[in-house]
Amino acid sequence: MAAIRAGQLGKKVVLVERAELGGECLNRGCIPSKALIHASQLYHALATEGPEIGVNAPGATYDLAATMRWKESVVAKERAGVATLLKAAGVTVLAGRGRFTGPRSLDVEAADGGHERIDFAAAIIATGAVHATIPGFETDGEQVLNAWELLSIPRLPKSMLVLGGGVSGCELGQFLARVGVKVTIVELMPQILPGLDPDLSRELAAALGRLGVELRTGTRASALRRQPSGLTLEVNGPAGPEQLTAERLFVTVGKRPASQGLGLEEAGVVVDPKTGFIGVDAQMRTNVPHLYAAGDVARPPMLAHKSYREGIVAAEAIAGRPTRFDFRAMPSVVFTDPELASVGLTKEEAEKAGLHPREARFPFAALGRAHASHATTGWLKVVGDDSSGRLLGVHAAGGSVGEFAAEVALALEMGATVRDVAQTIHPHPTFSEALAEAALLWLGEPMHVARRTVPAAGR
C-alpha cells in the first residue's frame, strides 16, 4: 500500500521484497486462513444444518488436498493482482533481502548471492512481524507447527493441541475441529481471546464446546515431550498438573516485530529494546526524519487494515501531503463461528476512562434474516455514554458481524450518538439491523423485543 500510494503521488519507488508480494496477510495469514475456514464451514454445514433446511448430502467427504489447491489458487490470483497494481503505480519491484548500510543507502542481496546498492531520499520500513517462540516448544514443521506451516499442512492429524487461545488459535482450531480433528486449546490467560470483550469470549467458548473442542484456560504449559507416536504436553491449570496428548501441536503464542537484521543501527533508527518496535510519530516518521516505519514492525495492534492505513500515511507524508495516522476506532474481527466483531470501548474500558457507560444487547433470535439464514445464535451489544448519549462502542457475535463493523467505526469517527445510529435506516432483512435495534433498545424504545425499561432523561 505504501509503495502504490507513493507511486500514485509521483515518487520514484523501489519495493524490496525477499519473498512473495502481498506479505504475510495475503500469503500466510488472512487470505489463506479464511479460504480454509470457508471450506470447513461449508462441509460442516452440510452435515449439521443441511438436513433441517432440506439440503441432504449423504456421504459428503472433506478433501484436504483439494481445499489446499483451491486455497493456493486464491492466493495466486490475489498476488497477481498486487503485481498489477504495483506496475500501474510505476513501482519497480526488486527481489532480495534488504539491509541498511547507512541513513540513505541500502544493500539488497539477491537469492543468487549478488548484491545491489540503492541510494534513496526516503525509505519506509514495512517488514511486518515473525512468530514468537518459547524455549522448549520450538516448531519443527512436522510435529510442532506454527500458523504458516498449519496453513499448508499436507495431512489432517487425528488430534491437535493448540498452545495459545488468541485469534489464530481459535480460528484455525475451529477449522480443524469442523473437519474431524480432535482439538484441545491451552491458554495461559483466564479467557480465550484475551483482551476482547469477555462476553464475546464466552460466546465463542460455548461454540467451541459444541464442536467438541476442549478448552484449558488459565493454564500454563510447562514442558513438551516429543515421541515418534505423538506428543505429551505437561500443563498446570486450575485443576492442577495435567498431561495432554495429541498427534501434533500448533504453537500460536503471538508475534514480535521483524526489526532485527535490517541494519537499523547503521541507519540510526531507534528500536525499543524490550518490544522490538520501531518508534514513530503521527506521520510514521522514525527518529531519523527521512526514514519511516509502518505496520506490525512499528507498533500494535498487529492488524492488516491498520498497517494498510499506516503505509498510506507514510507515503503521503513523504510526498508532502497533509496527513496523519489518527483514529478513534480500530475495528477488530475474529473469523470464527460465530463471527466476532469489536469496535470502540467496552463498558469496562469506558468506566476506566471516567465515562458513564451503559449497555444494551439485542439478540439475533429477534432478527428475521437470522431465522431465514438458520443463524439465530448471537447478539449485538451497544455501549453508550449515559450522560451525553454518545456512542462509545459496539461488540457483536453472530452472522456477518464483521461486514458492518466499518459502519460502527464511521459512526465513532463522526462522534455519533446512539440515537444517530437508531435513526439510520438499515436495509431489511439484514444482520446489520441488529445495530439499529440494539441502539433503540439502549434508548428504551425497542421495536422487535419487548420494552422493559423507561429511558433515562437527556437522550
Image (cartoon, grey):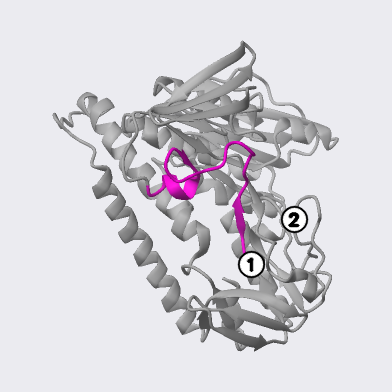
Q: Over which residues does the magenta segment extend?
A: 126-152
Which residue extends farthest top?
A: 239
Q: Quadrant of the C terminus?
A: top right
User: Label 2, on which residue?
Assistant: 276
Residue 10, numbered circle: none
Q: Is residue 338 above or below residue 344?
A: above
Q: Nearer the viewer, mark 2 or mark 1?
A: 2
Q: Quadrant of residue 242?
A: top right
Instruction: Find residue 423 and report its horizontal and vertical position in percent.
Output: 58, 43
Q: Quadrant of residue 385?
A: top right
Q: CA distance from mark 2 to mark 1?
A: 14 Å
Numbered marks: total: 2
Instruction: Find residue 104 and report its horizontal and vertical position in percent.
Output: 75, 84
Would you say 198 lies left or right of 179 here?
right
Residue in the image at 32% along x and 39% along y: 40
Q: Residues within 10 Å of mark 1 (few under 14, many from 20)?
A: many
Camera-side residue of 148 and 446: 148
Residue in the image at 63% along x and 52% along y: 302
| Residue 179 visible in image | yes
Q: For residue 140: magenta?
A: yes
Residue type, numbered disc 2: Gly
Residue in the image at 35% along x and 29% along y: 181
**Mark sitting earlier along the chain (2/1):** 1
Residue type, numbered disc 1: Ala
Q: Main secondary structure of the magenta part?
A: loop
User: Label 1, on which residue?
Assistant: 126
